[in-house]
Image (cartoon, grey):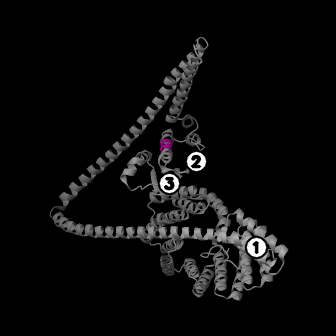
Amino acid sequence: MAPVKHIFLLIAGIFCMALAQAQNNKKIGSLLNSLPAAKTDTAKARIYNELAIEYDDIDSLKAYAYQRRALAIFKKHNNIDGIAENYQAWGIILNNLNKKDSSLIVYQMAVGLAEKAGDLDLQGSLYVNIGLVYSNLRDLPKASEYYNKAYLVSEKTGNKRLMGNATRKLGNIYLHEEDFLKALANFKKAYSLYAESGDSASMGECLGSIGFASRYANMPDSAIVYFNKAIELFTRVNYKTFIPIAYTEIGRTYFEQEHYTQAVENFKKALALYKGIQYEDHVDALNIFTGQALTELHQYDEAQRYLEAGKALAQKTNDLEMQREAEDGLYNYYLKTKNYVKALEALKQFNNLKDTIIKKEQLQTTTELNAKYESEKKERQIQQQQLEITTRTYQVTKRNYWIAGISAITMLSGLLLYQLYRRNRLKQHARLQAEILHQQEMAAKAIVEAEENERKRISRDLHDGVGQMMSAARMNLSAIENNIYFATEEHKLNFEKVILLIDESCNEVRTVSHNMMPNALLKAGLSSAVREFVDKIDASIIKVTLHAEGLNERIDTNTETVLYRVIQECVNNVIKHAKASTLDIALIKDTDGISATIEDNGQGFDIIKAKDFEGIGLKNIQSRINYLKGTVEWDSAKGRGTLVAMHVPIG
């Protein structure tokens, strides 16, 4: 029998994902409904934070937009704890986008802020998240280190649920390392902690984990007991998705003990329950398992139906492991029914799939090793930077002590005179700084307004002047065409080419004029103008999707124009430089302002290098957003695309 793909959702965190997916949309609706009732900016920002996490698995653009909105509010009120929570949401988004290095950096920033705010529970939660990233990178020692940190921090506050999370994650690591007794000990400890905190969902997950570890520790009777306890708990709290999963694992346990009748009974219970909740995941595996057990019971006709059904579902979802399992089951079936030709065919398919899976695993291993190397390299860089910062801080502090001592002696001899002088100097400096800022704003405003006025003038001149003259020339040429005698057919063709060139020139003038000042922007507003702009982009070059929300009413014309220009420049940069195949644009307006995100899947760039900043016009984008008193941030690196996130206040 070939190795089986266990369908007990994840070795590290059995059952969790299904619960999150089942309740995602319901929680999003509840959060959106609670927004109008939020009485303070901070309360609204915390709802945005939760929306970012809930949208993470559904729509990464919306998730990022809500995260940036929350961040803008927290920064506005200098809410350190809120910023730390927001960075945690940001880290979750980056991790699920497979940007592991970036997520680790953001999580570490959040840890520093949580320490500054004295929020131990948040520190513990962040340590668990960091451990998950390292676990995904297959750096299990590092993951264990952070799970232990999470446990120690949460122990100080008595947060049983957080202690349970850290303990269960450690159990998953022991399970992965095949130290089943230690895994069992951690899962049982986590169950007790969850029971103290009254967390029924997590208690059920632990029961499943205990059953899973017991089976692998060669304690099948114990495994069945715990799986049945999980079924009782999930039935009581009405978590329907998990019940068939537990029945499946009971069936697998019986199958491994060669109790095929009981295995078939439990597999069929799971299939019936999946049908009742219209849930298709793992149905391919269940059909195959049922067919294998029926083969061992010599119920061949029914066995073949289940095996073929499972194979078809696995092919539909391109699940190579389940296809291999189906071929293994069919090989055994054909051998027992003495159909040796079919058995040989199934064996060949099995070996082909086995080779394909091995190659895929080798490629994944190589990718994971590279990711681990880059992660360690990044961590060493961070440690070096922290050391340099500490050294510089010490030097600056030492120097400041000397300066303070000398200044104190000086101040004792003429304190009143110094204070009067200093107060006058500060006032002058403040007035000067205010005037400089005012002049800079005026200059930036004048530049942008002058540029837009010039665009309007050129657009008007092209359309009303050059365009009209060329149209008149076209009409005159058409009018005299019938009155001209052409000596040869070639002369006539040359005349028609001239008319065609004038037609093309007229179209080009109209296109340039429209790009400089699109009618949709003047008539219908920002959303329509951006949609009209992206609709003209050739889908064979790049596929563009646009999501707009809350832009039914017009906003300040100047803001619309500047934002349109910025989005236009970002899109042009992607087309020229990114070598991307997809581009996602999101425009969301609410009471706090307008958030815009532009994300591509292209080759990315190093935003730290000054020459790259100059080369693709990022400073131009920055200056335009500064003019609107907004913020703009870039997230990019070589080989992993680019995300531009902007927020502009309105009102």
Q: Which mark is residue 343?
A: 1
Q: Secondary structure at mark 2?
A: strand
In the shown orientation, is residue 344 left or right of residue 360? right
Which residues make up the magenta segment? 563-569
Left or right for 182, reference 630 = right
Tell me how far mark 2 sits from mark 1, CA to CA: 49 Å
Residue 90 sits above or below residue 602 on the image:
below
From the viewer's side, name the closer residue of 130 and 281: 281
Q: Quadrant of residue 298?
A: bottom right
Query: Distance between the Cα atoms at labels 1 and 3?
Result: 52 Å
Mark toward the start of the polypeptide (1 vs 3): 1
Q: For the point 48% across and 46% down, which residue is it?
A: 570
Element type where label 1 sits in the image? helix
**Apparent side of residue 345 relative to residue 122 in the rendered image (left or right):** right
Mark nearer the viewer, 1 or 3:
1
Give yes or no for contact between labels 2 and 1 (Cβ–Cβ under 8 Å).
no
Q: Amino acid type of disc 3?
A: Leu
Front label number (3 vs 2):
2
| Residue carrying label 2 | 544
User: Where in the figure is residue 85, as x and y percent of width and height?
Assistant: 50, 66
Q: Which residue is mark 3?
A: 643
Coordinates of residue 90 in the picture (x, y in percent): 51, 62
Compared with 560, 25 (above or below) is: below
Q: Is residue 635 highlighted in magenta?
A: no
Type of the residue with mark 1: Ala
- Mark closer to the chain start, 2 or 1: 1
Secondary element under disc 3, as helix, strand or loop, is: strand
